[in-house]
Amino acid sequence: MSKPVFAYLLLSEHPYGREMLRQILSEGFVPSIIISEDSDIGDEEREKFLKRIEGNPIAPTIENQLKSLESNGINVPHINVPIHNTEHVMHHIEGMELDLIVFGGTRIIRGPILDHPKDGVINSHPGLLPDCRGSASPAWSVYHDIPIGSTTHFCDNGIDTGDILLRREVGVRRGMTYEDLCYETLVLAGVLMKEALMAWDADEWASMKMKQGESDWPTFRNAPPEILEVVDQKLKNQTYAHYID
């Protein structure tokens, strides 16, 4: 099969989206358009995530990755919008016959955007679904002793509730910090997205697609300081329940 025609959406220069773009480009999956949300909330989310992975390497900026493509004669339109919603996104993509939309770290997106591409909208979430939906998944996973990992899934109008394509645990070793876990799930999310696109190329999605089922846990919100204190202490004392060593 030919490579999918897809749009790539992310918060402006978010490290999550930068890593994912690096991963998918490494296998020749080039977006037909990149749409970045340039907003105050996007800036806050980017800075928050940079803090979460502090001390770990960050992928090149979107602009630098696009310059590398340009040096090889590949030009990808890069659009900035104030928010990823129907009003600001659809007129950029409605004339495009997209197979997919790939989310590379966005806010919650609902509405006609999800129905536009032929084969759906996919996202990689830095937590194991359905057990750890919502925000700050590595923190809540340590806090509640849930295994840590990432999941690539289809997007619907819920929060991290769409059908699963790929799901994989991170091997958590003693001595790893919260920042390390956030970084490992970030990288794994990009790897799983790359593998999901490779599976699309091989026409394997029908056999991979799985319903999520129910979760014993709520949809988590951002972890407050008192939760992060417990997380840091559990990792320091090595009392998290799912070490592999």
Image (tube, grey):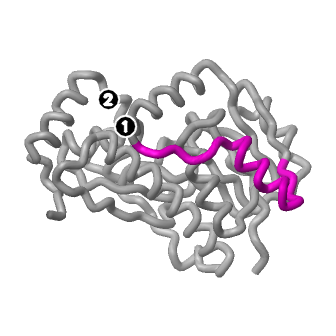
Q: Which residue is mark 2?
A: 223
**241 left or right of 75?**
left
Residue at horizontal 65 percent and vertical 79 percent from the top: 203
Q: CA distance from mark 1 to mark 2?
A: 6 Å
What amino acid is found at the position of numbered circle 1 in the picture? Ala
Give the magenta-colored segment's residue range.
56-76
- Is 117 drawn above or below residue 230 in the view shown? below
Quadrant including the N terminus: bottom right
> Which residue occupies the foreground of this view, 156 or 62?
62
- Is 210 magenta? The answer is no
Determine whether, in the image, residue 170 is placed left or right of residue 143.
right
Task: Classify 14 as above or below 124.
Answer: above
Residue in the image at 39% along x and 35% along y: 54
Residue 29: assigned label: none
Furthest residue toward top: 40
Residue 37 in the figure: left or right of residue 165 = right
Which percent across, then down, holds residue 168?
Answer: 38, 64
Q: Residue at x 36, y 55 (%)?
A: 128
According to the picture, the residue beneath numbered tag 1 turns out to be 136
Residue 213 locus on image (x, y percent): 37, 58
Q: Secondary structure at mark 1?
A: loop
Up-down relation of residue 150 to residue 83 (above or below): below
Contact (Cβ within 8 Å) of mark 1 with mark 2: yes
Horizontal and vertical percent for residue 119?
Answer: 70, 63
SS at badge 2: loop
Where on the picture, by quarter, is residue 149?
A: bottom left
Residue plotted at (51% across, 53% down): 124
Is 68 inside the magenta-drawn segment? yes
